[in-house]
Amino acid sequence: MSYVDTSVIVAALDPTDPRSQRAKAVLEEKGRKVVSELVVAELASVLSRRTGLLSELAGRLGLSRELTEVAVILYLLRRFNLEYRALGTRTKVTVFGRMYAPMAVAMELSSRLRLKTLDLLHAAYLKLLKEAGEPIHTLVTADKDFKEAEEGLRDAVDVNVRLIE
């Protein structure tokens, strides 16, 4: 099973991205692929900045921009057979008190992985999803920073990195 990073979906949707066809091919492969609530939030952010596209689609569908954004995300999940997995309200106790689990785990992983914040959060989601029983073995990404941190990810999260170049 694979965890798909937002960068792969965005690359697949951007015809000007040289990785677009490879990203689409990977997303269309058979096998279980999961995304987290972080991926969904990032997709919403990317779509919200495409105001012309959302306005045009909203007009065609007769929906508000907000509902159109949700419809597009749901379409993408279904189109590429991506399974959405949420962590709910899981929290962990830290020296700062109770904290949403992905944030706490990202803090724990930060010194080992030395990734940017969003990448750390993806690593935290991976770790927590695995702890919840998801048999994720691969992180599929178009982000080279993950490939550079692959050894640390293998040690800390027990996943391999598949880089779409």
Image (tube, rainbow, N blue to C red):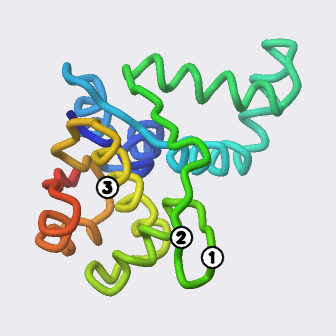
Q: Name the residue under label 3.
A: 127
Q: Which of 153 and 70 is in front in this view?
A: 153
**3 lies above or below 101:** above
Q: What residue type is labelled 1?
A: Gly
**Residue depicted at x 28% and y 23%:** 28
Judged left or right of residue 109, residue 85 is: right
Depth check, mark 2 against mark 3: the one in front is 2
Q: 10 Å neighbourhood of mark 1: few (<14), some, or many (≥20)?
A: few
**Are the residues tagged 1 and 3 within 8 Å (C-beta)?**
no
Label 2: element kind: strand
Q: Which of 5 and 124 is in front in this view?
A: 124
Q: Which amino acid does label 3 sit on?
A: Lys
Residue occupying the far top of the picture:
61
Q: 10 Å neighbourhood of mark 2: few (<14), some, or many (≥20)?
A: few
Q: Report how far apart the C-alphas of labels 2 and 3 lie in the structure.
A: 17 Å
**Residue depicted at x 85% and y 18%:** 63
Q: Name the residue under label 2.
A: 93
Q: Which amino acid does label 2 sit on?
A: Val
- Residue 1's disc is none
- Residue 97's disc is 1
Tell me the quadrant of the picture where the C terminus can be found.
bottom left
Depth check, mark 1 against mark 3: the one in front is 1
**Are the residues tagged 2 and 1 within 8 Å (C-beta)?**
yes
Q: Which x, y percent locates residue 162? A: 17, 51
Q: In which quarter of the image is residue 143?
A: bottom left
All told, the count of numbered labels is 3
Q: Which x, y percent locates residue 122? A: 41, 58
Judged left or right of residue 108, residue 51 is: right
**Residue depicted at x 37% and y 80%:** 110
**Are the residues tagged 2 and 3 within 8 Å (C-beta)?**
no
Q: Which x, y percent locates residue 109? A: 34, 75
